[in-house]
Image (tube, rainbow, N blue to C red):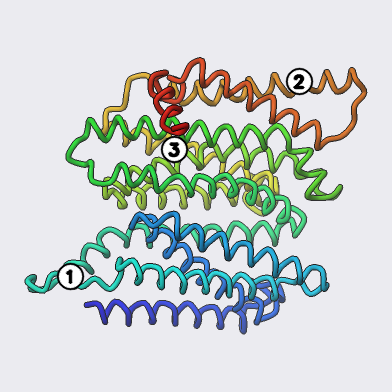
Amino acid sequence: MNRWFILYSFLVVGFILLITSFSITYMQDIIWNNIKDVTVFVVFILVIAIEMQSIINNYGHSKSLTIPVQKIKICFLLLQLIVISILYYLSQLNIFSFSITLIISNVLFSLFGVILFRREKVICQLPDKTKQKPYSEISKYIYNFSHPLFTLALFTSLGMFFDRWFLQNIVGSIDQGFFHFANRLSILILVFNGAIIPIMQKELVGLNSNILLLQRKYEKFLLIFYFISNFLVCCILFNINTIIDVFLNEQYRASYHVILIVVFGTIFRSLGQFQNVLLISMNKTKIIRNIGLIMAIVGFVLTLIFLSPQEMLFNIGLNLGAIGLSLKFLLLEILSVFIVYIYININLKLSKYFIFKLISISLLLFVCMATVTYANGFIFELLQVNGTISYSLFNILIFSMLIFYWVLRYPNIIGFRKEELFELYRTQTN
């Protein structure tokens, strides 16, 4: 069974390469818009290398090797930064050299990760030979658990490809750049979540038999991590103009509303991440797939409505460009989170006021940041002080101090009691 699985994997990769080659050769003008063949293949290899790195990284978390794996990861991230900086200095930085650098870095990370796993003896562990078909049982478990997620990933990837292709062909590269940069900002927050999600998953796995304990732990972790995500979102949401001034140029000034919508939607995307962690911990991957496929179908219809010119789609096209694509994802994220929340609440019987606690966290952070931003704007104008960077840094500093005060004053906001905070402080200082 294990050999058949490997053969099947090679056939899938070969089929994807064949389709890619066909699309480059015969459909280049339609799909790839005259992009060089070698660029498409290099980016394709980069995607595979990134997926390899992700698998190694997640495996390290599952085997309680988070610290050594992250040390290796940081080393190769620094290597990436150094090489990219040198290429930029030598005026040799382009999509090809950038992709090759990331491919080498991710592949080397994967190799060093495997060496670490061998040294710690967490791989190459053979199943119990007393079982008649040990590999068959393992393969069956992997298939039952993973094939819904694989199916969802396939359709989600196709949907994302269609969205970006349609956006490019309807409105061009300017709106494409607007949406891409906004999406990168959103992913920064989600990547931060990815660093803390393994903690949550490690605590939830294996609690299916104790629903009450699972419910309590899930609520406590969700309050903490949702609070952190909302804090990061507010820091970006109220400083978009500064981000545009520092990292972009005047051409991106019109991207303000696109960034605003996408970053705001990150609140729901992060909540969806935490919901999926619970469902995965409960072996409910089929639920994730079913809801995801429904959202993909709805998303396809919304893409056509929001992006199509009026004359192209029975006079109902809105031709909103990047803003339309941002609104589409925001609506899907809200709808998906709402449906999954109902399912989780039916199975776990969440606390009666838990949903109001989540809403309170968002409102508290939003009102605090809005108040700080307004007050600082008034003070800076009164003192006639200029400087967007200093203004934003001052906003974030005051906002952080204010939130820190509220958490210490009312720790139940994030699911803590004062006694627990004091105990945590004593533990860290001793």
Against 211, residue 53 (above or below) is: below
Q: Which mark is residue 61?
A: none
Badge 3 or badge 2: first in the primary sequence: 3
Task: Name the quarter where the C terminus is drawn.
Answer: top left
Amino acid type shown at disc 2: Tyr
Question: Mark 1 sits on what residue?
Answer: 127
SS for dot 3: helix
The reply to whether dot 3 and dot 2 touch (C-beta < 8 Å) is no
Question: Mark 2 sits on what residue?
Answer: 374
Residue 310, visible in the rendered structure: no
Q: Residues within 10 Å of mark 2 (few under 14, many from 20)?
A: few
Of tags 1 and 3, which is closer to the observer? 1
Badge 1 or badge 2: first in the primary sequence: 1
User: Residue 139: x percent and y percent?
Assistant: 23, 69
Against 140, residue 299 (above or below) is: above
Residue appearing at x 53%, y 61% in the figure: 73
SS for dot 1: loop
Residue appearing at x 60%, y 46% in the figure: 186
Question: Mark 3 sits on what residue?
Answer: 337
Amino acid type shown at disc 3: Val
Mark 3 vs mark 2, CA separation in Å: 31 Å
Nearer to us in this view, 130 or 47: 130
User: Residue 428: x percent and y percent?
Assistant: 45, 34
Nearer to us in this view, 256 or 237: 237
Amino acid type shown at disc 1: Pro
Residue 430, visible in the rendered structure: yes
Against 419, residue 426 (above or below) is: below
The reply to whether dot 1 and dot 2 touch (C-beta < 8 Å) is no
Badge 1 or badge 3: first in the primary sequence: 1
